[in-house]
Image (cartoon, rainbow, N blue to C red):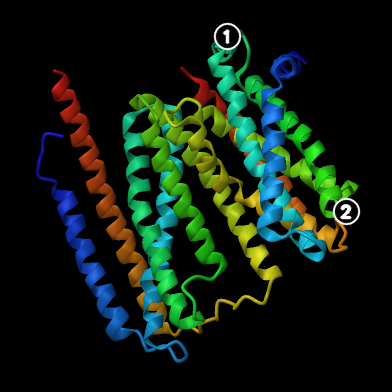
């Protein structure tokens, strides 16, 4: 319980800091809307095209907006010296990881909570279904977990924000492919059971990444 | 480390030269001409071998990364970084030979065939690993970050493989791999090629490790 308490304290701290500045969520949201416009111009998203492209456009937007939020969240941690404080405090490194990952997950969820209805409304695609939301939720868990680990690495390098997408995207391919395929199958009228293999792949990815990140995060922070 | 003559390394280099030449001879002279694809198919032996070595090298980096995190010894980091660099060469070769093969057989330089795609994904991960190393200051921190990245990256490769394979089988309009019936001679040639490339990998890895050790020593001498 102590573990959960410490983890929760980190999440609350992130949310409070975000409430004051609103820089992470607003940057992600503005970027996501711009990205929707870019895709709309590039692919001429209307009618059947919109429906066919929807899962891909949605996840590409989430992936790119996610890298913005992830690196901002960890850069802020470093610039304010907060990470040093956390390391001095008697907190388990694993609790720091889960706290940061959960905070980042919430930031991306907030962005998605605006993005999905907006997408559904603008392009007339029925995205607001419980199955689609479940897949998005599960996919985002894995993405936020691997993203938090790699962002913690990237902020300690010279290249910082530039390096994160290069490190993150090739490792996120399984979850990107699986999420796009599952949502695509759902939009074509399939059920979740029919796309069960893909859903299992997302869950396996989430578990594997969480386990590996839990084991290695301590080494990233070791200073 | 005082020995400048690397006798085992020399023997290894000699052995790989002999086996690579044997493999080359077998590819062109011993293996039969494939019925439908013709001589183009001969690229298959070296293509598969370089893809195998590319994957194996990444596995070595994964193991070396784990050992580095546990023990914190520089030699495991040297092994990890050397294996990535040598592996990068082989996986690049796999991607290039793959697209050269695809051109006459499928009529295009690139198809999103699962094995070719996973090689490309691995190539990108290797490049990212190299970029990460160059962007980190301090050898100890560089080794630590690289080890973590090598481990996380490696565990995602099998998942990527499954994802890409299912993704392609769901869209069957893409030309399939064209199953080849391998004759015994073909299998023998493939096995010798695999052995040749694995030996070549070991040779290059050994030399790369040696080079890094010399660089370490030089840095030490400069400081004195």
**x, y (%) of residue A212?**
59, 36
Front one among A10 and A15? A15
Could you tell me which chain the residue with mark 1 belongs to? A
Could you tell me which chain the residue with mark 2 belongs to? A
Front one among B192 and A90? A90
Residue at image position (40%, 64%) is B94
Front one among A128 and B219? A128
What mark, if any, has residue A85 been given in the picture? 1
Q: Residues within 10 Å of mark 2 (few under 14, many from 20)?
A: some
* C-alpha gap between disc 2 and disc 1: 46 Å
Residue at image position (55%, 81%) is B178
**x, y (%) of residue A121?**
86, 48
Query: In the structure shown, which secondary structural element does the residue marked by tag 2 occupy?
Result: loop
The answer to whether the residue labelled 2 contacts the one labelled 1, judged by CB atoms less than 8 Å apart, is no
**x, y (%) of residue B76?**
36, 35
Q: How many marks?
A: 2
Residue at image position (49%, 81%) is B107
Q: Nearer the viewer, mark 2 or mark 1?
A: 2
Front one among A61 and A2? A61
Q: Is residue A202 visible?
A: yes
Residue at image position (40%, 88%) is B38
Q: Is residue B35 left or right of residue A101?
A: left
Q: Is residue A178 visible?
A: no
The picture quadrant where one finds residue A114 is top right
Circle 2 sits on which residue? Answer: A126
Above or below residue A152? Residue B167 is below
**x, y (%) of residue A6?**
71, 14
Q: Residue furthest bottom?
A: B35
Q: Quadrant of the N terminus of chain A?
A: top right
């Amino acid at each position: 319980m102590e573990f959960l308490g410490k983890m929760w304290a980190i999440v609350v701290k992130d949310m409070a800091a975000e409430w004051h500045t609103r820089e992470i969520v607003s940057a992600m949201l503005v970027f996501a809307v711009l990205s929707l416009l870019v895709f709309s111009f590039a692919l001429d998203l209307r009618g059947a095209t919109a429906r066919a492209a929807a899962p891909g456009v949605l996840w590409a937007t989430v992936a790119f907006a996610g890298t913005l939020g992830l690196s901002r969240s960890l850069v802020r941690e470093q610039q304010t010296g907060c990470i040093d404080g956390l390391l001095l405090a008697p907190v388990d490194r694993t609790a720091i990881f889960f706290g940061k990952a959960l905070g980042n997950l919430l930031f991306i969820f907030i962005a998605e909570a605006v993005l999905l209805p907006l997408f559904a409304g603008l392009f007339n695609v029925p995205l607001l279904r419980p199955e689609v939301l479940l897949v998005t939720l599960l996919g985002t868990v894995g993405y936020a977990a691997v993203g938090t680990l790699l962002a913690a690495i990237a902020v300690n390098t010279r290249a910082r924000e530039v390096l994160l997408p290069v490190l993150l995207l090739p490792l996120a391919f399984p979850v990107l492919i699986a999420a796009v395929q599952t949502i695509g199958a759902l939009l074509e009228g399939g059920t979740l059971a029919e796309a069960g293999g893909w859903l299992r792949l997302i869950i396996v990815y989430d578990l594997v990444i969480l386990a590996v990140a839990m084991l290695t995060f301590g080494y990233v922070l070791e200073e | 480390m005082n020995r400048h003559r690397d006798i085992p390394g020399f023997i290894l280099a000699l052995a790989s030269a002999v086996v690579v030449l044997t493999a080359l001879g077998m590819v062109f002279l011993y293996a039969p001409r494939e019925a439908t694809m013709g001589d183009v198919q001969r690229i298959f032996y070296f293509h598969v071998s370089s893809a195998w070595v590319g994957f194996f090298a990444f596995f070595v980096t994964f193991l070396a990364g784990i050992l580095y995190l546990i023990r914190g010894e520089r030699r495991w980091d040297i092994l990890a970084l050397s294996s990535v660099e040598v592996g990068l060469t082989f996986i690049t070769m796999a991607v290039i030979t793959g697209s050269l093969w695809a051109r006459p057989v499928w009529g295009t330089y690139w198809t999103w065939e699962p094995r070719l795609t996973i090689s490309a994904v691995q190539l990108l991960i290797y490049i990212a690993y190299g970029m990460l190393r160059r962007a980190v200051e301090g050898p100890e921190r560089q080794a630590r970050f690289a080890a973590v990245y090598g481990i996380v990256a490696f565990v995602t490769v099998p998942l990527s493989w499954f994802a890409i394979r299912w993704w392609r089988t769901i869209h069957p309009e893409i030309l399939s791999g064209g199953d080849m019936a391998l004759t015994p001679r073909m299998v023998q040639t493939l096995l010798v090629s695999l052995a040749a490339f694995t030996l070549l990998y070991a040779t290059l890895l050994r030399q790369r490790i040696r080079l890094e050790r010399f660089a370490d020593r030089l840095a030490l001498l400069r400081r004195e």
